[in-house]
Image: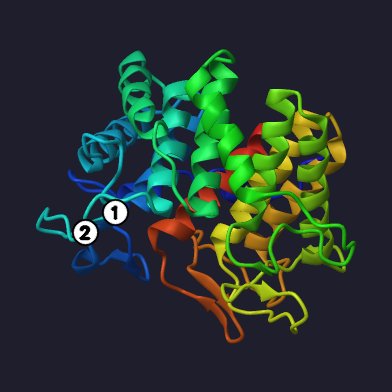
Amino acid sequence: MTATVPVPVASAGFAHLRRLTDDTGLLEHARHAVPRRAHGYCVDDVARGLVVTCREPDPEPEVLELAERYLAFLTHAQDEHGAFHNRLSYDRRWTDQPQLGDWWGRALWGLGTAAARGPAHRIRADALVAFTAGAARRSPAPHAMAFAGLGAVEVLRADPGNALATGLLIDAAAAIGRPGADPRWPWPTPSLSYASAALAEVVLAAGHLTGDDGLRVAGLRMLSWLRDIQVVDGRLSALPAAGWRQGTPRLRYDQQPIEVAAFADACATAAELTGDDRWHLGVRQAVDWFLGANDGGAVMWDEETGGGYDGLTPDGPNLNQGAESTLALVSTLQLARRQALVA
């Protein structure tokens, strides 16, 4: 597949993440490109930040520094029982109690990625300690378990015999469930909400890594259906923030960059685990979504700042460049570069 993405996109890099990061962590929101300190920090975004900094091959010293800062934030957020706070105010006060919500799952995703791919031994070692403490817990929420399962997948790629990660991944797949028999809605639940592709990715990876072919087929079926319902005339039409319930009309807006990044991640995993290069097209479509091949025909990133826009609305992009959307942009471009889809 030849490179067709303009070179500046390939170099969007970490500039805006550095802008949003201070000596404490990654600020959650921005007004346009200016960080909004009043909204503070959240584990959800810092965990995603740890994922992308540890995925970066041969990181520059500035990226290594970001990874260390994000890891320190996550280990500070974790309690002695493996649960996590989520929200820290700008004056460094936790505003919630440690729990096992989505942020627990995303923290384990970040820690698992750092344990497997961290750019320094000290990062890998400390991340594994924190992952091990958190991976002994279980959340009642399928999405939280799915994000934790992504962390388990990372650990197992580096250490296939890790029993704790294997148990977490198996339990994550069980929490997500398997698709029903109805070919019109091959999904475990009657509604799609957010980061749906991550759920399919975990089921697929669990089947592959545990040798459960039925589970592997179920994950591919789920992801194939998500691809089919989200690709319109060759372009990605991401599921909106409101989700979609079986038997109801599907809305087009607001589309979130994080949904696009989850789709790109899942397609990259499907290509890796199945050897089917056709899944690379999903990553290509996710990149193109940021470049304007979307329902609004709008470019979804700021070339000057390197930040990702917060959402695609009926009136065009939400021009704020918060952490979540920027991380989604960086993550998607990392996959594209790895697959040689960009220059």
CA separation in Å, label 2 and label 1: 7 Å
Residue 304 appearing in the image: no
Helix or strand or loop: what does disc 1 sit on?
loop
What's the residue at 38%, 20% (across, down)? 124
Horizontal side of 132 relative to 159 (left or right) equals left
Q: Which residue in the protein does label 1 denote?
A: 86
Q: From the image, tell me which residue sits under label 2.
A: 96
| Contact, mark 2 vs mark 1 (Cβ under 8 Å) | yes
**Quadrant (top left, top right, bottom left, bottom right) of the N terminus:** top right
Relative depth, front residue between 283 and 98: 98
Above/below status of 162 relative to 183: above
Q: Point out the tag, 2 or 1, that comes first from the N-terminus.
A: 1
| Mark 2 nearby-residue class (10 Å; few <14, some 14–19, many ≥20) | few
Q: What's under tag 1, amino acid-wise?
A: Asn
**Horizontal side of residue 334 vs 82, given as left or right:** right
Q: Is residue 127 left or right of residue 340?
A: left
Percent x, y of residue 219: 76, 44
Position of residue 259 measured from the top left corner of the image (x, y, whole percent): 60, 60
Q: Which residue occupies 57% across, 22% down? A: 156
